Amino acid sequence: MKRAELLKPLLNHSMGGIELVASRPKPLAELTQDELKEFAKRLEADDYTYQRYHGIPQLRVWEALALHHYMDPAVLGLGRKGRLGELKRVAHELLPSSTRLLNFVGAVPPLLLDIDQGKLVCVKVAADLLQSFTTLQRFKSYVSDQRLRAYPQRAPTRERLPFDAASLPPKLRDMWEGMQLWKTVTEGGTVIPGCPSTEPDLMKFFVGKGYSAYQSKAFAAAFRPSFAHIGRRPKAEW
């Protein structure tokens, strides 16, 4: 995975979305009305959502259903136990401003029945049929056979504000700054691939930001690109 991809899922959302991802998410039942509106916005799939699923060999049936309803499966989070019940309650709270989630949860029972009857070709997970595996092509064939009554419309493309690193929460801002230190000369940085003397010491950088040696080493390893030299790195100066 390219180093720029590490933060991309976070940086592609608004500030409110980043804050929710950076901290432990609150149960949906505890969200305020403003937070529910933000959640509804984050549910909407964008181009990056579909890029993530392009070319994958298989996916969960609930992920396919979410994409059919133009929703981001990562935000929907149906892999978590008890999540469907939470989503059903929230779907009604979002009315009348948003019906997308309500349409999704309403499509779940007939989908489960079709899986049980073999009308959707998939590898069944008996304990939870929503976790069964299918392919995008098989799900498209299932939809084209008019198994699903609802054909949702994609939400209008939202205008995104220019990215401002200063708006990030402190920890994500530190990670972003550390990642930028690996930018090559052609990318506007100072690193010359194949020249170890130009490579940054990210462990020292993160220690200087107040992180422990263990955390700093983990961050440095995560952002180390494939072109970095192989060998023992210089010891950090404490």
Image (cartoon, rainbow, N blue to C red):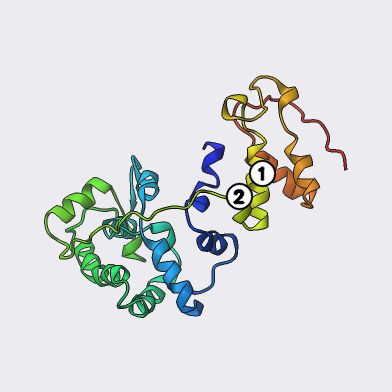
Q: Quadrant of residue 193?
A: top right
Q: Is residue 162 left or right of residue 104?
A: right
**Residue at the spot 79% in from the left edge and 40% down from the top edge:** 204
Q: 13 or 214, which is in the foreground?
A: 13
Where's the C terminus, which quadrant? top right
Mark 2 secondary-structure assignment: helix
Relative to 45, say whether 110 is above or below: below
Q: In this view, does 113 lie to the left or right of 206?
A: left
> Which residue is painted at 54% across and 60% down in the image?
21
Name the disc covering residue 147, or none.
none
Is residue 28 something that shows in the picture? Answer: no
| Residue 113 in the image, given as x and y percentages of width and height | 21, 68
Res. 71 visible in picture: yes
Q: In which quarter of the image is residue 218?
A: top right
Q: Which amino acid does label 1 sit on?
A: Glu
Rendered image: mark on residue 177? 1
Give yes or no for contact between labels 1 and 2 (Cβ–Cβ under 8 Å): yes
Residue at the top extreme, as displayed: 194
Badge 2 is on which residue? 165
Q: Which of 177 and 51 is in front in this view?
A: 177
